[in-house]
């Protein structure tokens, strides 16, 4: 019976020792590797934000170009209708004048 208690005590001490070693190995301060990873993540985030800003600027420029092209298209379509109308009037006039 005495050996059972000794084995339990040794087992408990072993478990306590392992837990203590894990806890003692952990600090509240970041390691150099953690700081490097954090710096890399920060640089990646800044790079992504810059890329987003560039893409938003490009989108605005493209939208402005699109609006200008649509305005130009409307102008050309209006002019085309005017020319077609004049052409039709001329055809009617030429047909009517030839008789």
Image (spheres, rainbow, N blue to C red):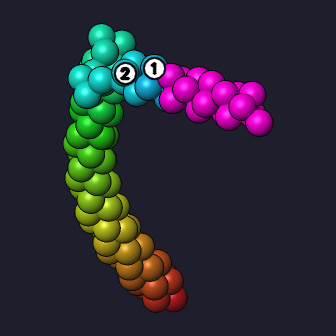
Q: Look at the magenta stretch and give its main secondary structure.
A: helix
Above or below for 24 versus 77: above
**Is residue 25 found inside the magenta-colored segment of the image?**
no
- Residue 19's spot in the image, x, y percent? 49, 29
Whether residue 46 is visible, yes or no, is yes
Residue at (30% x, 11% y) in the render: 32
Above or below for 38 versus 63: above
- Residue 93's spot in the image, x, y percent? 41, 83
Q: Nearer the viewer, residue 10 or 25?
A: 10
Q: Nearer the viewer, residue 26 or 2?
A: 2
Whether residue 51 is visible, yes or no, is no
Above or below for 12 versus 78: above
Proximity of marks 1 and 2: CB atoms separated by less than 8 Å = yes
Packing grade of label 2 (10 A; few <14, some 14-19, many >=20) is: few
**Residue pointed to by mark 1:** 21
- Secondary structure beneath dot 2 equals helix
Q: Nearer the viewer, residue 9 or 27?
A: 9
Residue 24 is marked as 2
Question: In screen coordinates, is 61 left or right of 22?
Answer: left
- Residue 60's spot in the image, x, y percent? 24, 50
Above or below for 87 versus 10: below
Q: Nearer the viewer, residue 56 or 52?
A: 52
**Is residue 10 found inside the magenta-colored segment of the image?**
yes
Residue at (27% x, 59% y) in the render: 67
Q: Can you name the residue that lies furthest to the front here?
A: 2
Q: Which quadrant of the rendered structure holds the N terminus? A: top right
Q: Which residues are magenta?
A: 1-18
Residue at (27% x, 45% y) in the render: 56
- Secondary structure beneath dot 1 equals helix
């Amino acid at each position: 019976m005495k050996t059972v208690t000794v084995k339990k005590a040794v087992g408990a001490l072993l478990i306590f020792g392992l837990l203590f070693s894990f806890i003692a190995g952990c600090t509240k301060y970041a390691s150099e590797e953690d700081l490097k990873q954090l710096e890399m993540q920060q640089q990646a985030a800044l790079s992504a934000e810059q890329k987003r800003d560039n893409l938003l600027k490009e989108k605005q420029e493209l939208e402005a170009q699109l609006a200008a092209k649509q305005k130009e298209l409307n102008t050309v379509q209006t002019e085309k209708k005017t020319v077609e109308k004049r052409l039709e009037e001329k055809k009617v006039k030429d047909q009517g004048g030839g008789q």
